[in-house]
Amino acid sequence: MAKRVTKAVIPAAGLGTRFLPATKAMPKEMLPVVDKPAIQYVVEEAVDAGLHDVLMVTGRNKNALENHFDRATELEASLVQKGDTDRLEKVNYSTDLADMHYVRQGDPKGLGHAVLRAKMHVGDEAFAVLLGDDIIDSRDTLLDRMLEVQQEKNATVVALLEVDPSQIHLYGAAAVETTDADDVVRVTGLVEKPDREHAPSNYAIIGRYVLRPEVFEVLERTEPGKGGEIQLTDALETLAADESIAGGVYGVVFRGRRYDTGDRLDYIKAIVQLAVDRADLGPELRPWLREFAAGLDDAPASHEIVDEMTTTPADSLASPRN
Ligand code: UTP
């Protein structure tokens, strides 16, 4: 049995271009999902799985991320003065959540490059990587199971989600073999964002990994791949192809709820899905949503109005109407 993992690495240094202009001066990981920034859900998930040592890989606009997990003395003093203990508790909660550490990525040269920045902090032990824009619903378990499998196999463990074949080109796809456990597969190969015809399966890699320290040496040797970036998937492919490096790669098949908050449509869905189940918002939101959805059938063309409102001058040049 391998030693139990204690450290989590959270890459949050991407440019977040799909969310511009919202992410011009703010990391996408700070976008609120209901009333918490996406990154807080991710840190909470790490802590819930027993990973209290959290290293965040930050890029430009790192202050917002660091400040969120730090004291906010003026705000705290004001809430104390008002006797607003509920909100004070919420503010203090993120401060005391984990033992937070930060490292800069410099240039965002890809997820693999971001993970490599964790080498000094992690040292010679296995560690978890949680993508800062990927939320796993806290009512479903994934990371605990991945840590369990990592300990048992002493290998690399990735999280896999079965997606519609039409969506596989958006992910890294895994070639897999079954194992004795219904929710665990052995990964024999990986392809980053394959065409539907070339995808080895519908198993998409999502933003949770448990890696062995050997991954750092592999990343150091990994040449820039798709998009000119150093891809973590390429390093995982090397680990899957040669079990002698770090015991091979296993996948835990996740069948729960996951929200990709780096994608605009998924982000909107995440807010709605999480808010309808909240005791403070759900009772009012649910009937409103039903009424709103019923009204959509009567107004099929209203998106054209919104398009007009949100089209920037650059968009109009790129796709002239009529
Ligand atoms: P994405 O590919 O979704 O992030 O990376 P992005 O490049 O910021 O997004 P778009 O496509 O431009 O909108 C997945 C995760 O890896 C981190 C991101 O912050 C995100 O959490 N990442 C990505 C880094 O930390 N560094 C990088 O160089 C790239």
Image: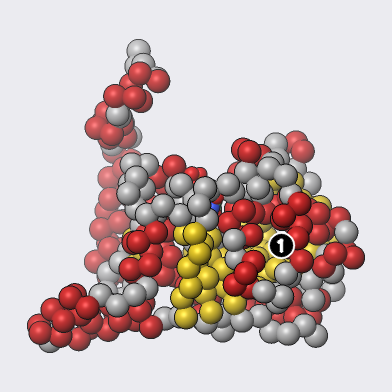
Secondary element at image label 1? helix
Give percent across and percent down for residue 143: 61, 74
Q: Is 147 located above or below residue 15 in the figure?
A: below
Q: In which quarter of the image is the N terminus?
A: bottom right
Q: Which residue is drawn at 36% across and 48% down?
A: 23
62 horizontally vs 49: left or right: left
| Nearer to us in this view, 129 or 208 | 129
Q: Is residue 75 visible?
A: yes
Q: Is residue 207 visible?
A: no
| Nearer to us in this view, 164 or 296 | 164
Give percent across and percent down for residue 253: 69, 65
| Nearer to us in this view, 185 or 56 | 56
Q: In which quarter of the image is the C terminus?
A: top left
Count of all numbered marks drawn on residues in the image: 1
Q: Mark 1 points at which residue?
A: 216
Q: Mark 1: give few (<14), some (14-19) or many (20+) Cα within 10 Å.
A: many
Quarter occupied by residue 287: bottom left
Give percent across and percent down for residue 149: 74, 76
Quarter occupied by residue 21: top left
169 horizontally vs 293: left or right: right
Q: Is mark 1 within 8 Å of ligand 1?
A: no
Give percent across and percent down for residue 225: 69, 41
Q: Is 199 located above or below residue 141 in the figure?
A: above
